[in-house]
Structures are given as C-alpha cells and as structure tokens.
Amino acid sequence: MAATFHLSVVTPERQVLDGEVKFVALPAHDGEIGIMRNRAPLLVRLAPGALRADTDGGPRTLYIDGGFAEMAENRLTVLTEAAARPEELDAEAIQAAFDEARALSIPDDAAFAERQRALSRARVQRKLLP
Amino acid sequence: MANRRVLVKRRKAARNIRKITRTMQLIATARFQAAHTRATAGKPYTEKLTQLMENLARAAGGVKHPLMAQNPEAGRGALIVLTSDRGMCGGYNTNVLRAANDFLAAADEPVDVSMVGKKGVAFFRFLGAEMAEAITDFGDAPRFDQVEPLANRLMQRFAAGELASVDVVYTQFVSTARQRAVVERILPLSPETPGEEEGSADLEYEFSPAPQELLEELLPASVRVRIYQCFTDAAVSEQIARMVAMKAATDAAGDMIKRLTMQYNRARQTQITMELLDIVGGANALE
C-alpha cells in the first residue's frame, strides 16, 4: 500500500535527509506545494520555510533556507544552501536575528525587501522551534 | 668526557621533538579524515546542481546572464588566495603563494587580492604587497555561511561591471597522494556546453518560475558552491600536507636518534679503551 517516493535533502555541507516518504510539503517561492508519488516532473524555486515530510518513522519537519527542488521519476531532490532540523535551531540566535532585522533602517525598496526577508526567515524558524 | 654528555643531551632533544611531531602527525591524520568526510558530503549537492543547470539551459534555449558577461573595460581583476592559518605543513603555503605571485606577475591589470589564512597575510605583508582583504577567521573547517558573504560580494562587484575576472588560487585535492596548487577561474562563467548524452534530459519539466528566471538564481548558487568547494579542497590538502611533513620530520628525528646513539656508543667505547690502556700502561711501568 505504501505509495512512497524518494526524498533527499542536500546542502553544500551535508546530506540532511535521505529516505522514502509518502508525502512532502515544500515551501515554494509562491506558496506551499504538496508532492505525492508519481507527480509530473517539476523544477521549482524555494523560499525560506518549513519542509514537512511523511516518512515511515512519522512526520518530519525541516527548516529550509530557500534553494531548489526537483521532482523526476519519483525522486525528489531538494537543494538548499542551509537546512536545519528543529532541534538544531537556536532560539536565542533566532531572536537576535529578528531583533537585528527589525532595527534595520529602510532607506530604499531593496533594503525594505531585505528586511522583510530577514524577518520572515526568523518568524518561520521561530515557529519551528521544538 | 664532555663529548659524551653533549651527545646524551642532543639525543634527548631529538627524542622530544620526535614525540611532538608524531603527535602532530596523528592529529593531522584525524583532521584529514574529518575534512575529507566534509568535502565528500558536499558532492551530491554540486552534482545535482550541475545537472539541473544543464537541463535548464536546454529548456531555456541559450543562457544570458550578467555573471557570464565579459567586462573588458572593468580594468580590474580579483583573486582569492587560500592559505592556512598554521604552519608546519611543508610546502603547502609556499606552493600556493608562488602560484599566486606568478598569477599576479602575469596579470596585465590591477588585481584585488582577498587573502585567506594567516600565513598568506604574513607573507604578503612581508613582501609589502597590497591586499584588498585579509581574512583570518575561517579556521580549518570552513563553513558554507562563512564563504557565502565573500562569494556574494565578489559576484555583486562582477555583475556591476567593476571586475573583469575572479580567480581562486588554492591547493586542489587530486588524491591522497597528489595535491597541487592551481588557479581556477570562477568568473566570468563559461557558457555551459550542452551535453547530449544523459537520458533523463528528455523529461518534460514543469518550471516554476520560468526557466530563465530559475537560471538567474541557479547560476549564483553554482558560483557560491564552487568557491566553497575550493575552500574544502584546500582544507583537505592542508591536512595532508601537514601529515606528510610531520611524517618526514618524525622519520628524520628517528634517523638522527640512531646516529646519535651510535656516536655515543663509540665515544663510550673509546673512553673505556683509553682507560684500559692507561691501567695496562701503568701496570707495565711498575714491573
């Protein structure tokens, strides 16, 4: 019955996750996207956010710092420059990043976008804290 | 008499040095394994990224990106030099710095040097050569988020047309028996030569956003990871270089101890013989 497919999450530093899953929810650049077995080939850009996966050993959550995901032939590969399990996140560091982002001045649109990105990043991470 | 005592002292010194170099060799071995694991852990990411880029380039049909542009009028280059923070690693830093100097001597326009590692910084200060940046806080296990700002800075300047090229001088890890100092061109990116061979390329992908936009994100990511890989390669090579250097030092100390022991024994024997001769001579004189 197990309609599973392969998921691997890799960063330049390590392989964070590698195994069979039933369902994955990805933080795509334009909203969350859910993937199940036999999905059509897809290449999508990701935004910082939470990746949820239904593995054999129960649901798993990961923080993903943007990147790309490719689904092809029942293999989902997530490429991201940084990923963390919820237990690896540091509450104080997140709060510090949040406060720092909030204190940024906003001289132009680019700076505003930068600030928003940093803020939403910190918010997502905070939500994921165990 | 005095000679013997000197020999004992020297032998003791050589023994102590051997103890230290052997320890350093063992530490380097352990560090090398750790660094090597780290370097290989990043391989899947790079491979996948390259593959994605090829697929995308094919789907987008020709790629144009600021990172691929030639900026001949920029009149400035950038060079990242990767040296170690610590010494005792044989010719490791010398080779990198020689390659860097050759590169700088051959360059026909000014080059901004980003020097990584205390050894390189000290050497360039000694030469009185200019450095745009001196980075000494990477340690011997560079992390991606440490390398990222440097890569982003250079890419930004390149895209703005301030730089004509970006190169990295580092020690490439070919195999455990072979590492060499190389200059690698990072920017401008050479246009991907579309490979025709692999089968997965026939898949009809759904792209989100459009291929062209995706490429604009992928290219900088690939530059970042290439620079990061230079760092991990350099870290692995450094530990190997230290391992080899310390092995040689340990062996040399062993040889020296052997030679000193021999000299000591000979000196002792000579002395005994002389004393015996004295006694025999004295006894003979009494008769």
Image: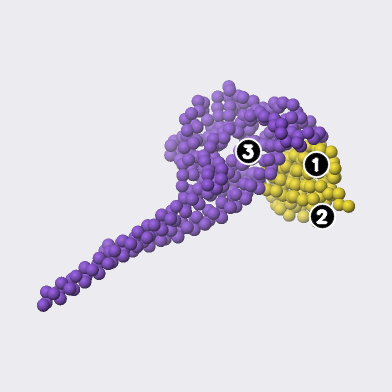
- Image colour for chain B is purple
Judged left or right of residue B99, residue A61 is right
Q: Which residue is mark 2?
A: A56
Q: Which residue is mark 3?
A: B226
Q: Are marks 1 and 2 on the same chain?
A: yes
User: Label 3 sits on what residue type?
Assistant: Arg
Measure the alpha-carbon separation of dots 2 and 3: 35 Å
| x and y, in percent, of residue B66 in the image | 67, 27
Q: Which residue is mark 1?
A: A73
| x and y, in percent, of residue B258 in the image | 37, 60
| Foreground pick, B84 / A114 | B84
- Pick out the residue farthest to the bottom: B287
Residue B114 makes an appearance in the image: no
Observer-side mark, 3 or 1, equals 1
Residue B160, by quadrant, is top right
Residue B249 higher or lower than B169, as above or below? below
Q: Are marks 2 and 3 on the same chain?
A: no
Q: Pointers 3 and 1 in contact (CB under 8 A)? A: no
Residue B110 higher or lower than B10, as above or below? above
For mark 2, give the secondary structure: loop
Residue B140 makes an appearance in the image: yes
| Foreground pick, A112 / B240 | B240
- Pick out the residue farthest to the right: A1
- Chain identity of mark 1: A
On-image quarter of the C terminus of chain B: bottom left
Residue A103, by quadrant, is top right
